[in-house]
Image (cartoon, helix red, strand yellow):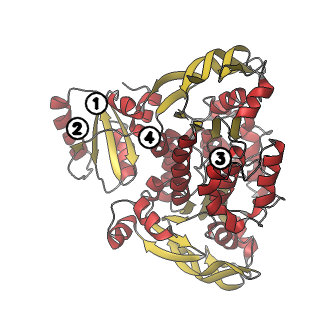
């Protein structure tokens, strides 16, 4: 089954077309890299797919639900994290997870177990009572991801999750993405690190609101006759 | 001449979190000097001290021979600073932001247009747009113009390209490299190792300490492991398998490739490794020795597995 199906999805702000008739699908358990230059329309597309913004035209189904009419059900079935908003700095690690888990109505007793399991997996159980403000950025991002999947969503949207994160922690983060995908969670991820694009099953490259290229990293490199995704990207985005 | 001279700098927050430990560092005039280290290593703390925004607990810091504590006002006249968070006025237009910084520094745009021209050409089509409405790459280019408009002798940039797309990133670095023709020293931090490679020298900072200052070529020469690359069908299943590898080595995905740095005698280790992959049913392409990149060096040094 497809976790995401976007069909001619379009968003206009006045005269400006931010997202221009995009069509693509993401399968269950697939890691889909959603690439594009700054201002290409990625974040607007993600907002529509997560039920936060209505399209001007076109539609999409997310986990089988229609973004036009079933946005509440969509929100219950997706996880979301970004570089910008992730967690509350003046709450502890445990409190943050508890807050999000409670919002998603995970029963209290089960929630505590899930949080402790999740922290053990992250090797962060010793930090359960530490304020989030005082842990390093890379740890925060790993924690934000664990929090975003605590309610076991079918799809996770990750908007530049590793922005500013160092090379070692970035790889640890991708290990978490792979673990989630191997359990069947569909992942849609944006990144400006082109080595990370290679870790995706398929990628799309957006420019001026349109998806210009879509395929496996291997296919796109072959199609463009270059050796790296960075070169593919530069060739397409260069004005 | 030294652009920056740092002696014995320490900084602790709230009397317990040690941010910087006995930092000693010289930056030469005209260098593009990189600060590289894991998150929370102390890079931003060091920037804030160098730009007179934070007082160290101890130590002596000179920027062009001026003391950053005693002569802070004079230091501020000759530095430009692009902090890690976007710090322009989002409600002012591109042009208004630039005018504002020029006036604050008693400088004029005309006078210094030759420095900012290559950047200004790219953002001037948007000069009436509010700064808050610019894309990430454009914001940083505007911030760079504003930091240069008073013709500083030294420019500090704290992760200027974080969140910026690869094309804009390259343009930004082309500009940085061109700035040196105006005798401006550049100190820059970055989480992108390809950018670190473009610096004249790099200081590696970890847990508040500087663990080495070298040109990128020297850092690469100092790599201790034997580095090999190959392709695998499933680089992440391999990640789990490698946890049981009996050899002294460090495995990590590297784009579409797998990298393994060995700390063994390769004559015996390589057949052992190939056997190990076979036993664990990990098909792979030919394993070939390669030169490390700065990213490989960063991973080796930070993991301390030598």
Q: Mark 2 vs mark 3: same chain? A: no
Tell me the subunit letter for badge 1: B
Q: Is residue B214 above or below residue A218?
A: above
Q: Which residue is disc 1 drawn over?
A: B247
Please name the residue that numbered disc 3 is placed on.
Answer: A114
Q: For this rendering, which residue is in front, B99 or B113?
A: B113
Classify B188 as above or below A144.
Answer: above
Q: How far apart in space, not on screen, are marks 2 and 4 (Cα)?
A: 31 Å
Q: Position of residue B269 (x, y in %)?
A: 20, 31
- Residue A207, image x and y in percent? 55, 72
Residue B5, horizontal then vertical, whole percent: 61, 20
Residue at mark 3: chain = A
- In the displayed structure image, the side of residue A33 where residue B51 appears, left or right: right
Of badges 2 and 3, the one in the foreground is 2
Q: Is residue A106 left or right of residue B270?
A: right
Callout 2 secondary element: helix
Instruction: Give the residue pinned by disc 2.
Output: B273
- Is residue B85 shown to the viewer in this render? no
Q: Position of residue B147 (x, y in %)?
A: 70, 44
Cα–Cα span, label 3 and label 1 = 35 Å
Q: Is residue A195 left or right of residue B154?
A: left
**Closer mark to the observer between disc 4 and disc 1:** 4
Q: Chain of mark 4?
A: B
Q: CA gap, disc 4 to disc 1?
A: 30 Å
Label 3, label 4: how far apart the Cα atoms are: 42 Å
Q: CA distance from mark 2 to mark 3?
A: 38 Å
Q: Find the residue positioned furthest to the front.
A: B111
Residue behind mark 4: B197
């Amino acid at each position: 089954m497809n976790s995401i199906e976007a069909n001619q999805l379009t968003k206009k702000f006045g005269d400006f077309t931010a997202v221009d008739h995009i069509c693509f699908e993401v399968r269950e358990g697939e890691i889909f890299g959603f690439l594009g230059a700054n201002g290409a329309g990625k974040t607007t597309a993600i907002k529509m797919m997560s039920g936060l913004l209505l399209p001007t035209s076109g539609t999409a189904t997310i986990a089988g639900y229609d973004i036009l009419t079933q946005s509440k059900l969509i929100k219950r079935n997706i996880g979301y994290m970004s570089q910008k908003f992730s967690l509350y700095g003046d709450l502890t690690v445990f409190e943050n997870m508890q807050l999000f888990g409670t919002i998603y109505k995970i029963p209290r007793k089960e929630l505590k177990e899930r949080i402790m399991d999740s922290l053990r997996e992250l090797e962060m159980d010793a930090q359960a009572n530490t304020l989030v403000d005082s842990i390093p950025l890379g740890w925060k991002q790993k924690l934000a991801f664990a929090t975003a999947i605590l309610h076991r969503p079918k799809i996770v949207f990750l908007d530049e999750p590793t922005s500013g994160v160092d090379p070692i922690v970035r790889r640890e983060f991708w290990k978490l993405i792979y673990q989630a995908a191997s359990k069947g969670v569909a992942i849609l991820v944006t990144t400006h690190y082109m080595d990370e694009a290679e870790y995706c099953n398929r990628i799309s490259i957006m420019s001026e609101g349109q998806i210009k290229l879509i395929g496996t990293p291997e296919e796109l490199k072959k199609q463009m006759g270059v050796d790296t995704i960075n070169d593919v990207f530069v060739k397409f985005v260069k004005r | 001449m030294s652009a920056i001279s740092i002696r014995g700098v320490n900084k602790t927050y709230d009397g317990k979190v040690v941010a910087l430990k006995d930092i000693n560092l010289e930056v030469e005039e005209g260098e593009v000097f990189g600060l590289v280290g894991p998150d929370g290593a102390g890079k931003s703390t060091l920037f804030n001290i160098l730009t007179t925004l934070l007082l160290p607990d101890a130590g002596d810091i000179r920027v062009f021979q001026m003391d950053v504590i005693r002569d802070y006002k004079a230091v501020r006249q000759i530095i430009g600073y692009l902090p890690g968070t976007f710090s322009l006025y989002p409600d002012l237009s591109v042009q208004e932001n630039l005018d504002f910084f020029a006036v604050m520094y008693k400088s004029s745009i005309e006078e210094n247009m030759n420095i900012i021209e290559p950047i200004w050409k790219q953002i001037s089509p948007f000069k009436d747009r509010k700064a808050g409405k610019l894309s990430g790459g454009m914001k940083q280019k505007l911030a760079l113009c504003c930091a240069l408009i008073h013709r500083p002798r030294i420019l500090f940039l704290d992760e200027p390209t974080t969140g910026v797309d690869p094309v804009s990133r390259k343009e930004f670095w082309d500009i940085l490299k061109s700035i040196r023709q105006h005798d401006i020293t550049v100190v820059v931090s970055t989480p992108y190792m390809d950018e670190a490679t473009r610096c004249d020298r790099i200081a590696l900072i970890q847990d508040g300490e500087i663990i080495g200052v070298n040109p990128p070529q020297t850092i690469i020469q100092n790599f201790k492991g034997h580095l090999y690359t190959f392709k695998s069908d499933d680089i992440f299943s391999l990640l789990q398998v490698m946890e049981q590898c009996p050899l002294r080595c460090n495995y990590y995905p590297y784009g579409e490739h797998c990298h393994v740095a060995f700390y063994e005698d390769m004559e015996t280790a390589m057949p052992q490794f190939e056997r190990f992959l076979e036993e664990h049913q990990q098909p792979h392409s030919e394993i070939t020795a390669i030169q490390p990149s700065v990213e490989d060096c960063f991973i080796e040094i930070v993991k301390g597995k030598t």
